[in-house]
Amino acid sequence: MTFGVMDIRQSTEAMEDQWLNSLAARSAQSAGRVKPETHCHIRTAFQRDRDRILHSKAFRRLKHKTQMFIAPTGDHYRTRLTHTLEVSQVSRTIARALRLNEDLTESIALAHDLGHPPFGHTGEYILNELSPFGYHHQQQGLRVVTVLENLNLTREVLDGMEGLTEEKPQFLTLEAQIVDIADRMTYLHHDVEDARRAGIMRDEDLPQNVLGILGQTRQERLDRMVMDLVRTSLTTMESDQPLIALSPPIWDAMMTLRQWMFDHIYLAPQRMEQTDNVRRMLSALYKFYFKHPEALSENLPQDDPLERRVLDYISGMTDRFAIEAYQNFLLPQAYRAFSVNMFSGELSP
Ligand code: MG
């Protein structure tokens, strides 16, 4: 049997209908987009969302944003981009195993950290202090896809992104729940690996119950969490309260690991020294752009108050763009015969 191009999306939707669990989101039944669009002949609504996210500028900038280490020089450390790709891979494995909508899961996973500022959670904490609007990377992620890059995503992807914020929508798809939990499993997995690579810790330093319950090696621990999540969720999905969940012993061990990482790695004194440096740099940049709005990107919504545009601009920066802007504008300069217009490029929104 041959298909014309016109049939491809419809046959994919029909396959979704046959293959997916009855609880899965179906792209043919999407609640749609704020601005209605005609259908694509090839891709489903969620596949289009995934492609839009992947082609966005904010996605490309994740390459030079901190995951755990600021502007790492070693090639094997995670950045926000490789973290995002790992979350996407783990999420898709789980979605496929549970016969949930893999394309929707992938879209939410690829978008889940688009609102991260430079310098990771340290940057987030400081922007939250500086801005009258406050700052949370999940909220900013929604702003990136709805305003700054206006991707016109489906309601299901937006709900999934909102599900990662403090104000969770009432109904959250199982696909969004997968990303929420896969994000935690993934960052714990790879941050342990990066901390070990940096010589800050050894695997055997982890608490005994983490090693005993989750496993001795990083591979074992991720495998056990994913297997447990799939097994537990298969059971809950047959109950009258379907949920994506870990079993209590694995969840508790994961929370112990998380707390240990905060106490020994994320909030370790050596890292806290960096916080002061990041605060000095972001505060100075914030004041600078406030005094020099002409230096902000013209692509920002011009009707927004200056405080909003400064926040959008700085939070969009990569680590290296922020360091470069600081060096260019806020450190004494040697005389240059030719001035460099750093705003001619497209490094930031
Ligand atoms: Mg994340």
Image (cartoon, rainbow, N blue to C red):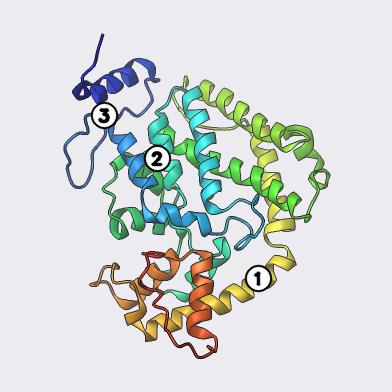
Q: Which mark is residue 42?
A: 3
Q: Secondary structure at mark 2?
A: helix
Say which label, 3 or 2, has the lower sequence index.
Answer: 3
Label 1, label 2: how many angstroms apart (C-alpha)?
A: 33 Å
Crowd band around label 2 with a 10 angstrom C-alpha radius: few (<14), some (14–19), many (20+): many
The residues tagged by marks 3 and 2 sit, at their Cα atoms, a distance apart of: 17 Å
Between circles 3 and 2, the one closer to the viewer is 3
Picture residue at 79% right of the left edge, 45% below the top: 206
Q: Which mark is residue 107?
A: 2
Query: Which amino acid type is shown beneath numbered disc 3?
Result: Ile
Q: Earlier in the sequence, mark 3 or mark 1?
A: 3
Q: Nearer the viewer, residue 30 or 82?
A: 82
Mark positioned earlier in the residue sequence (1 or 2) = 2
**x 61%, y 63%: residue:** 70
What residue is disc 1 on?
Answer: 274
- Please state which amino acid type lies under the numbered disc 1: Gln
Q: Nearer the viewer, residue 241 or 76?
A: 76
Residue 283 in view, yes or no:
no
